[in-house]
Image (tube, rainbow, N blue to C red):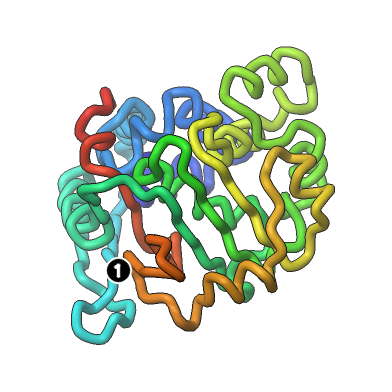
């Protein structure tokens, strides 16, 4: 979506299964890295057209921007925007980009992301660790996901089965699977999720779940890591947000991928979104 909320919550959030599947699929095929952090994009243009067709329904949007307090590090409300159209959303998106977007001068060769076990129990939700950081990771780099609470792939049995069957492959592979599989075509949001969760072969993803086996993790295309061993090496309690030195190794640490977006400046500015 590029930036969440606003009329997405109306036309996708309550629009039914077809709207959910199609919107996720359009965004994935267009390209995550072309959209992330961009308020205006082809998918948003579709939603704006939908808004024009529903003028008889009065809508008022109340949008908040949440970020970390510079002094305490606590999550605080940084902005409140109210309006009935795109202007309020654009202002909120602009502030969010300033507050929540980390534009780095160097690409990250190694990233460690921690997933709170109370919030992240599936890769369906936990893969924010991938798509929120992918623009900042160097080619040939590694993303280590410490996921002590993750014990399944999908949030429901149908999605879980599709992820297990097709895995997190490259976009061309997933598109080919779409052609071959009726079940996957009937669940385009699952296909989009598989694309979102792929590194496209550009970097290594080491997943360290608390409740999935090595065979299960490797079966969907990730490298398996033992969560206890990896947490001992990259201790979330000892790491600070951002750059750390771990035994002479330069590591970038993120404690909550849900509240930010990270990108290497050169990659962000070179994209054609």
Residue 177 image point, x, y percent: 72, 20
Work out which quarter of the rendered image holds the N terminus and state it.
Answer: top left
Task: Determine whether, in the image, residue 79 is placed left or right of residue 124.
Answer: left
Residue furthest to the bottom in view is 72
Q: Count residues near mark 1 (Cα–Cα under 10 Å), then give few for <14, some for 14-19, many for 20+.
A: some
Is 239 rendered above or below residue 11?
below
Q: Who is closer to the viewer here, 63 or 135? A: 135
Write down the residue under mark 1. Answer: 66
Q: Quadrant of residue 245?
A: bottom left
Q: Is residue 83 visible?
A: no
Q: Is residue 259 visible?
A: yes
Question: Tag count in the figure?
Answer: 1
Q: Position of residue 188 (x, y in %)?
A: 64, 30
**Is residue 204 or residue 197 the one in the foreground?**
204
Q: Secondary structure at mark 1?
A: strand
Q: Residue, x 65% and y 20% (percent of image)? A: 173
Residue 49 in the image, given as x and y percentages of width and height: 32, 27
Identify which residue is drawn at 27% across, 64% down. 65
In the rendered view, tell whether residue 169 sits above or below residue 158: above
The x and y percentages for residue 56 are: 33, 39
Q: Residue at x 50, y 54 (%)?
A: 129
Q: Quadrant of residue 51?
A: top left
Q: Is residue 200 left or right of residue 9?
A: right
Q: Residue at x 53, y 70 (%)?
A: 234
Image quadrant in which the C terminus is located: top left
Report which quarter residue 184 is drawn in. top right
């Amino acid at each position: 979506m590029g930036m969440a909320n606003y009329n997405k919550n109306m036309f996708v959030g309550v629009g039914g299964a077809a709207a959910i599947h199609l919107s996720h699929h359009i965004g994935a095929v267009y390209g995550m890295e072309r959209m992330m952090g961009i308020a205006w994009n082809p998918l948003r243009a579709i939603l704006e057209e939908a808004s024009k067709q529903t003028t008889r329904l009065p809508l008022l949007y109340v949008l908040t921007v949440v970020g970390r307090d510079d002094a305490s590090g606590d999550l605080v409300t940084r902005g409140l925007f109210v309006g009935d159209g795109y202007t309020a959303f654009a202002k909120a998106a602009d502030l969010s980009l300033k507050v929540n977007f980390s534009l780095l001068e160097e690409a990250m060769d190694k990233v460690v992301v921690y997933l709170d076990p109370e919030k992240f129990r599936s890769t369906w939700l936990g893969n924010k660790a991938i798509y929120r950081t992918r623009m900042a990771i160097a080619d040939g780099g590694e993303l280590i996901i410490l996921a002590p609470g993750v014990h399944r792939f999908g949030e429901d049995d149908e999605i879980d089965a599709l992820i297990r069957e097709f895995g997190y492959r490259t976009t061309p592979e997933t598109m080919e699977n779409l052609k071959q599989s009726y079940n996957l075509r009937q669940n385009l949001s699952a296909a989009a999720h598989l694309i979102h969760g792929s590194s496209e072969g550009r970097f290594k993803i080491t997943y360290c779940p608390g409740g999935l086996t090595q065979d299960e993790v490797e079966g969907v295309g990730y490298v398996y890591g033992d969560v206890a061993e990896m947490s001992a090496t990259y201790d979330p309690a000892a790491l600070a947000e951002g750059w750390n030195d771990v035994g002479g190794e330069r590591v970038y640490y993120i404690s909550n991928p849900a509240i930010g977006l990270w990108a290497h400046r050169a990659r962000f500015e070179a994209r054609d979104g």
